[in-house]
Image (cartoon, coloured by chain):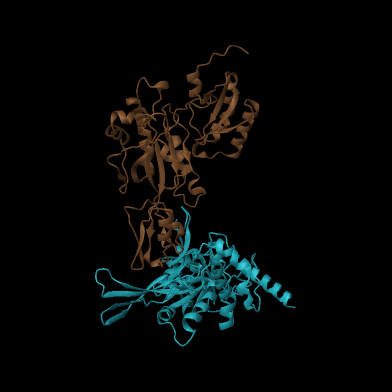
C-alpha cells in the first residue's frame, strides 16, 4: 500500500464520506424520491461485497451508503456506480467519475399517491423532477416531499418542504348527510366541516386540503380537485445552534413555482453566504436570518408567476431552540 | 330487429335519439375516485356516444337515475306546498343485465310493496326506457350466473354490444327501428352477449333457520367493518332512504323536503325516538344486510333481492366479501342441519 494522499474536499464533493476509520471511505448513492429499481439495488450489493465490508447503510435521507471502501478503490467504485447513476437518471458532468456534487442533498419523498391512500400527488415523480432541476450543486440545500399533511416524510426539517394538498370538490346532489366526512375530518384532521340544512359546509380558511373527506365519502359527493396543490414550508433545520421546524410560506402553490423557487435559491446563497463559513457550508436559514426575509423573497420569486389560488405568507417567523443565544 | 353499426353510425344514432330522449349512462369521471388520480365510473347524463363507458362495470349502479342520492320532493311555505319540478322528457338508461334485474327489485319496493305506489319514484319510472349493455365477459367479483341475473331477454328498448369498433344492436322497441335502420351498415339477428360463467360462486340455502341470528359467524364483522355504507350506496338493489325537512336559514317559514339515500351499515340507521338503537354492532348490521338480500326479501316476494353484481365487494375498503359471507351462511346452515339430525 502506498502513501495515502487524498484531497478530502474533492473526495467529499464526489459523494464519498470522510470516515473515522483511517484509509476507509463510504460511497453515497443518491436515490431521488426514495425509489430505486431492483437491478440497481443489486449493483449496490455487488459493490458492497466487492469493495466494501458486506454492509449497506440506509441513510436518513433515503440514500444508501456503502461503507468499508478502501480509499484507493474510489476510482473503481466510481466506474461501477455509473450504471446506477444512469438507471436513476442522475445529472452528471463527467461519465465514469461518479457523483459530481454532494452539497445539495438527496431529495426525499414519502411513497405518496403511487401507493398511499392519502397521498395527494406522485411525490416520487415530483422529487425526481426537483433533483433534475437542482442537482448537481455544491450548496447545502435539503428538499423533501410528502403526499399529505400527515408529513410522513418529515419535510418540516428541510429547507424546502412540499406537502400535497387537494381542494375538496363538493357535489351536494350526491350527498346523503351520512356525516362521515365531518366525523373523520374532526378525528383525523382539523375539523373544518359541519352540517347545515342537511348538507356539508367546508370552512375554507380552516381546511388544510388533506383529502380525508374525499377518502371517507361513500357516495363520491366529495372528490379531489383536478389540480394538485402544494403547501410549501420553508427553512426548517436540525443542528447545533437553532434547530427549528419549517414554517408555512405558500398555501395552494403549484408545481412549476416550487421548482423555480428552489432553483432561484442558489443565486441567493452565492450572493449572501458567509465567505468564512466552515467548509463553505451554511444552512440557508442562517443566511436569511442575516439578510432578512425580504431579500430572500426578492431572489426566490424571480420569474415566478404563482397560480391565482396561492396564498403567500407576508411575514414568516420561526421558533425552535436558540442554544446559541440562551444555552441548552 | 338486429343491426350492425360502425362507430360513426352508433354516434349518429345516439345523436338522433337525443332529440327525443335524455340519455343516462355510465361515464368515466377522471380523478373522481377516492384516491388521487383514480377514475370513477358514475351514472350521468351524456351528450354523445363517446361519453358512454361500455367496457367496464360502473362503480355505482344505475339506480341513481331513478332514486337520486339526494332528491328534493317538494317545497313548502306557510299553507302552500309544491312538488319539485321534473324534466318530463323520456329517458334512455344504459345498464347491464344485473342492473336491469335490479330495477325489478326497485319497482317491487317502490311500486308493489303494500297499498301505495311511491309517487316520486313512479313519475320518474314512467319516463325511463332501458338500454341493455351486453357483457362479453365476467368482471371481478361478479356472481350474476348464480343469482340468475346474467340474462335479460326482455324489458329493454334496445341492446348494445361493442367489439372491434362495430356496434351490434338488438331493438325490441319497434319505435326505435327507424333510427337504427338508417344508421346501420347491415341488418342481422343480434343476441346481446351475456356471461355463462363467473369466477365467484355463491350457494344460497333454500331455508335458513332463525338460529343463524345467534351464529358466531357475524362476530368478526363487528371489528372488521367500519360502517361506511359504501356497499349499500353502490348496491343496485338497496332502496333505503331517509328524509330531511330543511327550513331555509334566512326565512324559517320556507323550506323543502328531501329524500336522501341511507344505509343499514351506517351508524344511526336503527336509532328510534327515546334513544333506542336496534342493531348496535357492525356484526348485527352485517347480519341484517346479508339476510335481507338472501332471505327476508325472498320470504316476502318469492325471489332473492341480490342480483350478484359484486359491487359491494368491489368497493369495500376493508376487503370484506359479501359473496363469501353468503357461502359462510350456507356452511353454517349445513352444519346446523347435521347437528339437528
> Can residue B142 be seen at all in this image of the molecule?
no
> Can residue A249 be seen at all in this image of the molecule?
yes
Q: Residue at x 55, y 73 (%)?
A: B288
Q: Quadrant of residue B118?
A: bottom left
Q: At which x and y percent is residue A295?
A: 28, 32
Instruction: In this rendered view, identify the residue nearer to me: A39 or B154.
Output: A39
- How many numbered marks have been drawn onto this rendered protein structure? 0
> Residue placed farthest to the left in the image?
B251
Q: Quadrant of residue A280?
A: top left
Residue A163 vertical placement versus B54 (above, below): above
- Can you say which quadrant of the picture contains the N terminus of chain B? bottom right
Taking the image as shown, residue B148 lies to the left or right of residue B339, namely left
Check the rendered structure and report the hue given to chain B: cyan
Q: At which x and y percent is residue B114?
A: 48, 86
Chain identifier, brown in the render: A
Q: At which x and y percent is residue A228?
A: 40, 49
Q: Quadrant of residue A288?
A: top left
Taking the image as shown, residue A35 lies to the left or right of residue B74, namely right
Q: At which x and y percent is residue B207?
A: 65, 79
Instruction: In this rendered view, identify the residue nearer to me: B15 or A254.
Output: A254
Residue A190 vertical placement versus A196 (above, below): above
- Can you say which quadrant of the picture contains the C terminus of chain B? bottom right
> Residue placed farthest to the bottom in the image?
B115
> Residue placed farthest to the right in the image?
B341
Amino acid at each position: 500500500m502506498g502513501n495515502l494522499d487524498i484531497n478530502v474536499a474533492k473526495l467529499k464533493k464526489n459523494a464519498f464520506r470522510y470516515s473515522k476509520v483511517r484509509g476507509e471511505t463510504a460511497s453515497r448513492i443518491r436515490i431521488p424520491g426514495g425509489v430505486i429499481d431492483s437491478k440497481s439495488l443489486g449493483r449496490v450489493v455487488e459493490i458492497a461485497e466487492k469493495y466494501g465490508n458486506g454492509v449497506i447503510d440506509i441513510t436518513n435521507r433515503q440514500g444508501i451508503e456503502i461503507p468499508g471502501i478502501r480509499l484507493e478503490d474510489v476510482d473503481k467504485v466510481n466506474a461501477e456506480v455509473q450504471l446506477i447513476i444512469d438507471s436513476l437518471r442522475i445529472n452528471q458532468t463527467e461519465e465514469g467519475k461518479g457523483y459530481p456534487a454532494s452539497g445539495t442533498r438527496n431529495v426525499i419523498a414519502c411513497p405518496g399517491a403511487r401507493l398511499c391512500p392519502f397521498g395527494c400527488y406522485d411525490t416520487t415523480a415530483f422529487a425526481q423532477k426537483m433533483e433534475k432541476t437542482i442537482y448537481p450543486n455544491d450548496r447545502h440545500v435539503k428538499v423533501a416531499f410528502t403526499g399529505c399533511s400527515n408529513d410522513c416524510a418529515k419535510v418540516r426539517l428541510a429547507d424546502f418542504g412540499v406537502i400535497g394538498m387537494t381542494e375538496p370538490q363538493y357535489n351536494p346532489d350526491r350527498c346523503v348527510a351520512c356525516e362521515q366526512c365531518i366525523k373523520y375530518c374532526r378525528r383525523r384532521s382539523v375539523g373544518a366541516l359541519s352540517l347545515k340544512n342537511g348538507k356539508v359546509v367546508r370552512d375554507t380558511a380552516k381546511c388544510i386540503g388533506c383529502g380525508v373527506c374525499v377518502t371517507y365519502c361513500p357516495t363520491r359527493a366529495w372528490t379531489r380537485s383536478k389540480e394538485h396543490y402544494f403547501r410549501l414550508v420553508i427553512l426548517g433545520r436540525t443542528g447545533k445552534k437553532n434547530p427549528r421546524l419549517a414554517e408555512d410560506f405558500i398555501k395552494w402553490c403549484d408545481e412549476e413555482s416550487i421548482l423555480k423557487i428552489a432553483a432561484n435559491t442558489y443565486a441567493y446563497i452565492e450572493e449572501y453566504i458567509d465567505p468564512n463559513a466552515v467548509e463553505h457550508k451554511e444552512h440557508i436559514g442562517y443566511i436569511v436570518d442575516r439578510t432578512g426575509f425580504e431579500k430572500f423573497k426578492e431572489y426566490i420569486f424571480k420569474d415566478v408567476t404563482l397560480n391565482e389560488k396561492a396564498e403567500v405568507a407576508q411575514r414568516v417567523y420561526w421558533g425552535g431552540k436558540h442554544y446559541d443565544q440562551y444555552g441548552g | 330487429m338486429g343491426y350492425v353499426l360502425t362507430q360513426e353510425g352508433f354516434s349518429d344514432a345516439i345523436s338522433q335519439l337525443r332529440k327525443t330522449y335524455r340519455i343516462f349512462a355510465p361515464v368515466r369521471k377522471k380523478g373522481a375516485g377516492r384516491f388521487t388520480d383514480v377514475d370513477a365510473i358514475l351514472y350521468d347524463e351524456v351528450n354523445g356516444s363517446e361519453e358512454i363507458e361500455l367496457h367496464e362495470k360502473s362503480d355505482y349502479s344505475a339506480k341513481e337515475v331513478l332514486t337520486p342520492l339526494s332528491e328534493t320532493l317538494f317545497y313548502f311555505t306557510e299553507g302552500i306546498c309544491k312538488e319539485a319540478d321534473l324534466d318530463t322528457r323520456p329517458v334512455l338508461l344504459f345498464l347491464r343485465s344485473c342492473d336491469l334485474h335490479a330495477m325489478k327489485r326497485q319497482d317491487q319496493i317502490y311500486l308493489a310493496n303494500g297499498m301505495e305506489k311511491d309517487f316520486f319514484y313512479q313519475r320518474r319510472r314512467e319516463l325511463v326506457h332501458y338500454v341493455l349493455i351486453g357483457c362479453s365477459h365476467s368482471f371481478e367479483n361478479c356472481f350474476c350466473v348464480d343469482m340468475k341475473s346474467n340474462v335479460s331477454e326482455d324489458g329493454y328498448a334496445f341492446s348494445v354490444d361493442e367489439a372491434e369498433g362495430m356496434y351490434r344492436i338488438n331493438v325490441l322497441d319497434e319505435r326505435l327501428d327507424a333510427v337504427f335502420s338508417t344508421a346501420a351498415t347491415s341488418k342481422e339477428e343480434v343476441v346481446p352477449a351475456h356471461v355463462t360463467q363467473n369466477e365467484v360462486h355463491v350457494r344460497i340455502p333454500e331455508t335458513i333457520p332463525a338460529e343463524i341470528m345467534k351464529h358466531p359467524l357475524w362476530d368478526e364483522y363487528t371489528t372488521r367493518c367500519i360502517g361506511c355504507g359504501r356497499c349499500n350506496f353502490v348496491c343496485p338493489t338497496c332502496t333505503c332512504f331517509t328524509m330531511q325537512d330543511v327550513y331555509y336559514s334566512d326565512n324559517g317559514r320556507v323550506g323543502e323536503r328531501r329524500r336522501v339515500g341511507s344505509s343499514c351499515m351506517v351508524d344511526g340507521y336503527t336509532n328510534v325516538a327515546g334513544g333506542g338503537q336496534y342493531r348496535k354492532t357492525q356484526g348485527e348490521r352485517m347480519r341484517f344486510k346479508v339476510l335481507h338480500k338472501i332471505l327476508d326479501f325472498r320470504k316476502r316476494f318469492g325471489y332473492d333481492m341480490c342480483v350478484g353484481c359484486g359491487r359491494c365487494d368491489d368497493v369495500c375498503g376493508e376487503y370484506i366479501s359479501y359473496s363469501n359471507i353468503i357461502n359462510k351462511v350456507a356452511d353454517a346452515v349445513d352444519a346446523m342441519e347435521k347437528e339437528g339430525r
